[in-house]
Amino acid sequence: MSNAEIALGFSLSEARIGTVDGGESGLLVWKFGQLVAVLTQLDEEVYSTKGKWFLETGFGLLTGQHRSFNTIEEAVRWVAERTFSDHDCAVDRSAIFAAGR
């Protein structure tokens, strides 16, 4: 999946997440350059699932949330609906730039 296909302002970075021996396949979920979530791909042998994703941790409004998703697209849509909007991000950036002047 390319970043252009997921959602406006989102990008994904592959990572090994150290939740078990040897780690698990995972993705860092970025929104407008800010890390908002860490997803892991559920192990088929351990969880009797194939291709599902789990929200290991979220930041900001996602703190304390944990759930599984059938696809990465579903996971990113869910994260997008529950994190700051692109408008909020633009406001925060302008405040940062204004404070630096």
Image (cartoon, helix red, strand yellow):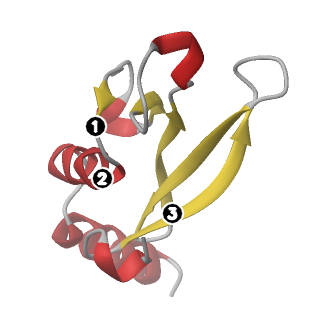
Quarter assignment of residue 26: top right
Disc 1 target residue: 70
Point out the tag, 1 or 3, that comes first from the N-terminus.
Answer: 3
What secondary structure is found at the residue carrying circle 2? helix
Q: Where in the figure is residue 87, as x and y percent of width and height? A: 17, 71
Quarter assignment of residue 86: bottom left
Disc 2 target residue: 76
Amino acid type, callout 1: Asn
Alpha-carbon span between mark 2 and mark 1: 11 Å
Disc 3 target residue: 12
Front in this rendered view, residue 36 or 100:
36
Residue at x-position 69% and y-position 50%: 15
Estimate how packed mark 2 is, as few (under 14), some (14 to 19) or many (20 or more) residues with alpha carbons within 10 Å: many
Point out the tag, 2 or 1, that comes first from the N-terminus.
Answer: 1
Amino acid type, callout 2: Val
Point out the tag, 3 or 2, that comes first from the N-terminus.
Answer: 3
User: Marks 2 and 3: in contact by CB < 8 Å?
Assistant: yes
Residue at x-position 84% and y-position 27%: 22
Q: Where in the figure is residue 91, as x and y percent of width and height? A: 25, 72
Point out the frontmost of discs 1 and 3: 1
Point out the frontmost of discs 2 and 1: 1
Residue at x-position 37% and y-position 38%: 60
